[in-house]
Image (cartoon, rainbow, N blue to C red):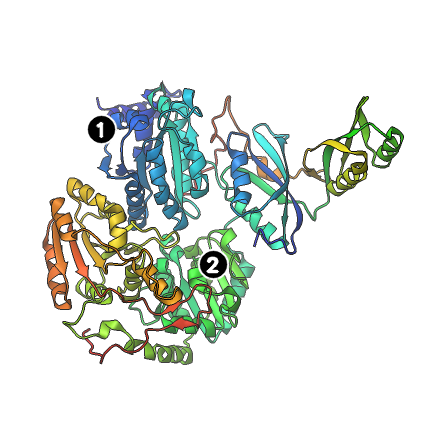
C-alpha cells in the first residue's frame, strides 16, 4: 500500500528524534522495508539540545502517510512526528548547480528570474546557488540544463510551520533533561506505567 | 558478605543517608543485578568469548541458567517462557554467530508480540567495526526484528538500559528487545548508578474515546448477525473473563484466531472455533454472511482474511487494538478502538444492551451440520492412524487441561482444530512467522515457567529435526515434557500444497528421518512408537508416568491433508473441503 505509486504525491514530514547514533538508521529503515523511496532527507540539530530534526519527503497517498506517522511513533527514539504537507508551512531547499561557462549573459538573466546567485565564477564554469520550494528548484534545474550541467547538489527540503507555535513545543518539553554527557537512552523521568 | 546482601545493605544505607555512597561494580555484575531487579529467575543461554565476563559473574546471583544446544533454542525458550507466564523471557548469547543464531527466535517473538530481552556479548568497544573475531553488527541485523535494541559500550549505562529494555519489552504491544554489551563494558569497574526511569512512548494516547465507544455500542446493539473475533490481544491483556461476560451479555458468538485460541473457552456454547485458511467451514461462511465483526486484539492477517476484496463485505467492523498502526491496516474499519483490549471491553460493557440472538445462533448451528460427517475424528478405532486421532485423544485424555506447544505445519492446524483450548496461554504456537523448530525449545521455556504442569509438544517430523538437539537440554536440565512427533514422512503442509496447487509434484518433501525412539534413547530419554489408534492411549499414559522427557513417534497416515483449506488469496467461502466422508461415522467421544 505504501509503495503503491498510484495516487501517491510528495508528502513532507517533520520528525523530531533523539540525537544519538543509529536513530537516523531506524527512521530510514522504516521506509526501506516497505520499498518506499525517500525523495529527500535533511537532518540537523533543533532548538533543543539532544534533539535532532529530520525533514523527510516521500511519495505516499494520504492513507499510507497517516500509517507512516503511526509507524514512526513506534520507534522508541522518535519524539514527535508531523505531516506538514497540508499545513501552513515554509518548505525550502538549497541547490548548487555548476554549469559550463558559455553564454554567461543568458545565464545571469536566468538567475535573476529564479532569484539565484552566482557563488563561483571561473573561466570554464559558473556555480549557481538557489533556495526555494522543491518544484521551483526543479524548474531552475530544467532551465539550466541547456547550459550544460556539470554538477548538481540539493540539500533536500527543510520545513517549518508558519506562526509562532513551534512544531515541537508540546512534545519536546519533557525530554532534553539530559545531564552531562548523556548516554544513549538517558532521558525523561516520567513514572513507569507498568 | 554475598554481593546481593551487600547490595541490600548499601541500598538501605542509601535510603537512610542523604547522599548515596557509590558501590563499585563490574558491568557484568550490574547486568545480573539489573536482571534480579526485574524479577528474572531463569535465563536461557550459551556462552562464548564476548559474553564470558557476564557468565563469570553469574553464579553469585539467584538466577538459574539453562544451557541450550543452539542459540535459536535459547530465543525460543525465552519466548515460550514469556508466552506461558506473561513475564519477560531472557536469552543470552555471545557475539557473532551467537547473536545471528538468535535471529530466527527474535523474529518469531516480534511477529507474535512476545516480551523478551536478549543479551548479547559484543567485541570490545576499542575494536568495534574492525571485523574483529566473532564481530557482527548485531544491532544492525536485529533492528527490524526488535521493538528496540541497544549497543552498550559503558558499564555505567547497563542498569538504565536494562531497566528501559524490560519496560519496552512488556509495555504497549509487547515484543523482543536486544541489548548488545561490549566485552570491555562487562569488564569495567564503575560506581554503580541507580537506574533512571525509562522513557515513555510518545505516540498519541492509547485509549478509546467516549464517542468511539458509543458508536461501537450502537453498532453492536443494532447488529442482527454479529461475530466477535478473539485475537492474541485478549490473552496478552488477560481479558478472557471480561470477554466471556461480554459475549454472554450481548449474545454474540465468538471465533478465535490461531493465536487467540484459549482466549475464549472452546467448549463455551458461544464459541465457534478458529477462523481463516484452516478455520472451521461454518466460521468462514458465517464471516462472509455477518453484518458486524467485533475484532478484539488481532491484526487481520492474510491467513485470517483470504482475499481482502471480498472479505466480510456485508459487515461493519469494530477493531479494538493496542497498536494504532494495525487499525485499518488490512481491513477498513467503521470504528477503531485504540487501547488495551481488556480496558476497552471494560469501557464497552456498560454501554451495550443485554440481548439474545437466537435466530443467528440457530443459523450458525445449521452451518455446522455438514462438517461433522467429513470429520476424520469419527473414524472407528483400530484403523490407520490419523494425526487428528492423536490430537483428539490427547485432548480427551488430558481433559483439555494440558499446555500444548506446537510447531508449524499440518500438525499445528490439526492441533488448532481438534484440541479444544479452554484456557488462555495453554496453546503456544508460532503464528506470525511460522517458525519450524519452535515447539521443542518453546516447550522447555514453558516448562521452566510451570515445572509441575503437564506439557505436550506436538511437532512434525520435519520441524522436530530442526531443533531436536534441545533433547540434550531436556536431559541435562531434567526438564519433563512430552513430545508427540506426528511423523508422516513428508514435509506435510508443503506436500499438501504440492498436491493441491502444484500438480501433485512432490519436490523435496519426502523426508527420511532417523529412528526417533532410538534418538530419544541416545539422550537417555524414553522413546515410544505408536502405529495404530488402539496404542495411543497406553502411550500417553506411559509418557505422563515417566519422570523424564518422553518422545512418542506417531506413525500417521502419510498423505492426509488439512481441511478445509482456503487457497491463498481466495474468497473465504471458497474452501476446499475434505472430499467425502471417509467411512461410516462412529462417535467415540
**Is residue B203 visible in the rendered structure shown here?**
no
The disc numbered 2 marks a residue on which chain? Answer: B
The disc numbered 1 marks a residue on which chain? Answer: B
Residue at image mark 1: B59
Cα separation between marks 2 and 1 = 45 Å
| Displayed quadrant of residue B358 | bottom left
> x, y (%) of residue B308?
50, 64
Q: Which mark is residue B19?
A: none
| Displayed quadrant of residue B266 | bottom left
> x, y (%) of residue B44?
27, 38
Q: Judge by depth and name the residue closer to the eye, B389 or B271.
A: B389
Task: Determine contact: label 2, label 1, CB under 8 Å.
Answer: no
Q: Secondary structure at mark 1?
A: helix
Residue at image mark 2: B320
Q: Against B408, is B359 above or below?
A: below
Residue at image coords 33%, 36%: B38
Q: Judge by depth and name the residue closer to the eye, B307 or A66.
A: B307
Q: Judge by depth and name the residue closer to the eye, B220 or B458.
A: B458
Q: Which quadrant is the N terminus of chain B positioned in?
A: top left
Query: Is residue B568 rendered to the left or right of residue A97?
Result: left
Query: Is residue A193 rendered to the left or right of residue B377?
Result: right
Q: Secondary structure at mark 2?
A: strand
> x, y (%) of residue B353?
46, 71
Residue at image coords 52%, 59%: B336
Q: Against B461, is A31 above or below?
A: above
**Is residue B303 visible in the rendered structure shown here?**
yes
Q: Residues within 10 Å of mark 1 (few under 14, many from 20)?
A: few
Residue at image coords 26%, 23%: B6
| Displayed quadrant of residue B50 | top left
Q: Which quadrant is the C terminus of chain B positioned in?
A: bottom left
Q: Residues within 10 Å of mark 2 (few under 14, many from 20)?
A: many
Both on one chain, marks 2 and 1? yes
Amino acid at each position: 500500500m505504501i509503495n503503491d505509486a498510484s495516487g501517491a504525491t510528495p508528502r513532507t514530514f517533520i520528525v523530531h528524534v533523539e540525537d544519538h547514533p543509529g536513530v537516523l538508521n531506524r527512521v530510514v529503515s522504516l521506509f526501506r522495508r516497505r520499498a518506499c523511496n525517500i525523495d529527500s532527507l535533511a537532518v540537523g540539530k533543533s532548538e533543543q539540545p539532544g534533539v535532532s530534526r529530520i525533514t523527510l519527503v516521500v511519495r505516499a497517498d494520504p492513507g499510507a502517510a497517516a500509517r507512516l506517522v503511526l509507524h514512526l511513533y513506534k520507534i522508541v527514539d522518535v519524539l514527535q512526528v508531523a505531516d506538514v504537507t497540508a499545513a501552513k508551512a515554509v518548505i525550502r531547499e538549497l541547490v548548487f548547480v555548476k554549469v559550463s561557462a558559455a553564454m554567461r549573459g543568458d545565464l545571469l538573466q536566468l538567475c535573476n528570474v529564479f532569484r539565484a546567485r552566482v557563488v563561483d565564477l571561473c573561466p570554464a564554469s559558473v556555480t549557481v546557488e538557489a533556495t526555494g520550494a522543491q518544484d521551483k528548484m526543479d524548474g531552475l534545474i530544467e532551465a539550466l540544463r541547456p547550459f550544460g550541467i556539470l554538477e548538481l547538489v540539493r540539500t533536500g527540503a527543510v520545513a517549518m510551520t508558519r506562526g509562532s507555535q513551534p512544531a515541537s513545543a508540546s512534545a519536546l518539553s519533557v525530554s532534553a533533561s539530559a545531564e552531562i554527557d548523556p548516554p544513549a537512552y538517558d532521558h525523561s523521568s516520567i513514572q513507569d506505567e507498568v | 558478605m554475598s554481593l546481593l546482601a551487600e547490595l541490600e545493605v548499601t541500598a538501605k544505607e542509601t535510603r537512610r543517608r542523604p547522599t548515596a555512597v557509590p558501590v563499585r561494580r563490574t558491568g557484568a555484575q550490574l547486568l545480573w543485578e539489573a536482571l534480579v531487579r526485574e524479577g528474572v529467575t531463569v535465563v536461557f543461554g550459551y556462552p562464548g568469548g564476548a559474553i564470558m565476563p557476564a557468565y563469570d559473574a553469574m553464579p553469585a546471583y539467584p538466577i538459574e541458567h539453562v544451557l541450550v544446544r543452539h542459540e535459536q533454542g535459547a530465543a525460543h525458550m525465552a519466548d515460550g517462557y514469556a508466552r506461558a507466564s506473561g513475564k519477560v523471557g531472557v536469552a543470552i548469547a555471545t557475539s557473532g554467530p551467537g547473536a545471528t543464531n538468535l535471529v530466527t527466535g527474535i523474529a518469531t517473538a516480534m511477529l507474535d508480540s512476545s516480551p523478551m530481552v536478549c543479551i548479547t556479548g559484543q567485541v570490545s568497544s576499542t575494536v568495534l567495526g574492525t571485523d574483529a573475531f566473532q564481530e557482527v553488527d548485531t544491532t544492525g541485523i536485529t533492528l527490524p526484528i526488535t521493538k528496540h535494541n541497544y549497543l552498550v559500550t559503558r558499564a555505567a549505562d547497563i542498569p538504565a538500559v536494562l531497566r528501559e529494555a524490560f519496560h519496552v519489552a512488556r509495555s504497549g504491544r509487547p515484543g523482543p528487545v536486544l541489548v548488545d554489551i561490549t566485552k570491555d563494558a562487562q569488564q569495567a569497574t564503575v560506581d554503580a548508578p541507580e537506574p533512571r526511569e525509562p522513557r515513555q512512548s510518545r505516540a498519541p494516547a492509547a485509549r478509546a474515546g467516549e464517542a468511539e465507544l458509543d458508536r461501537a455500542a450502537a453498532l453492536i446493539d443494532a447488529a442482527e448477525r454479529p461475530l466477535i473475533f478473539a485475537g492474541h490481544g485478549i490473552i496478552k491483556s488477560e481479558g478472557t473473563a471480561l470477554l466471556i461476560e461480554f459475549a454472554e451479555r450481548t449474545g454474540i458468538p465468538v471465533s478465535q484466531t490461531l493465536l487467540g485460541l484459549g482466549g475464549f473457552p472452546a467448549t463455551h456454547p458461544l464459541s465457534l472455533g478458529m477462523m481463516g485458511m484452516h478455520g472451521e467451514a461454518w466460521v468462514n461462511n458465517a464471516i462472509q454472511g455477518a453484518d458486524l465483526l467485533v475484532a478484539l486484539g488481532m491484526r487481520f492477517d492474510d491467513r485470517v482474511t483470504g482475499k481482502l476484496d471480498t472479505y466480510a463485505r456485508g459487515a461493519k467492523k469494530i477493531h479494538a487494538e493496542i497498536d494504532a498502526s494495525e487499525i485499518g491496516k488490512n481491513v477498513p474499519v467503521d470504528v477503531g478502538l485504540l487501547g488495551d483490549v481488556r480496558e476497552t471491553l471494560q469501557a464497552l460493557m456498560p454501554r451495550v444492551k443485554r440481548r439474545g440472538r437466537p435466530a443467528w445462533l440457530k443459523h450458525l448451528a445449521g452451518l455446522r451440520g455438514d462438517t461433522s460427517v467429513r470429520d476424520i475424528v469419527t473414524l472407528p478405532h483400530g484403523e490407520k492412524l490419523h494425526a487428528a486421532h492423536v490430537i483428539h485423544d490427547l485432548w480427551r485424555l488430558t481433559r483439555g487441561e494440558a499446555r500444548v506447544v506446537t510447531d508449524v505445519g499440518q500438525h499445528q492446524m490439526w492441533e488448532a482444530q481438534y484440541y479444544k483450548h479452554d484456557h488462555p496461554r495453554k496453546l503456544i504456537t508460532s503464528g506470525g512467522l511460522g517458525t519450524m523448530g519452535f515447539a521443542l525449545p518453546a516447550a522447555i521455556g514453558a516448562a521452566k515457567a510451570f515445572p509441575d504442569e503437564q506439557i505436550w509438544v506436538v511437532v512434525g517430523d520435519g520441524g522436530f529435526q530442526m531443533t531436536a538437539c534441545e533433547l540434550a537440554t531436556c536431559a541435562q536440565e531434567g526438564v519433563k515434557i512430552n513430545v508427540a512427533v506426528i511423523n508422516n514422512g513428508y514435509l506435510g503442509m508443503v506436500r499438501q500444497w504440492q498436491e493441491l496447487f502444484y500438480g501433485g509434484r512432490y519436490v523435496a518433501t519426502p523426508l527420511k528421518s532417523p529412528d526417533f525412539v532410538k534418538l530419544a534413547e541416545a539422550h537417555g530419554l524414553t522413546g515410544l512408537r505408536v502405529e495404530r489408534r488402539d496404542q495411543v492411549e497406553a502411550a500417553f499414559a506411559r509418557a505422563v508416568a515417566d519422570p523424564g522427557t518422553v518422545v512418542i513417534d506417531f506413525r500417521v497416515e502419510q498423505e492426509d491433508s488439512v481441511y478445509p483449506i482456503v487457497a491463498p488469496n481466495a474468497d473465504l467461502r471458497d474452501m476446499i473441503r475434505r472430499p467425502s466422508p471417509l467411512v461410516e461415522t462412529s462417535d467415540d467421544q
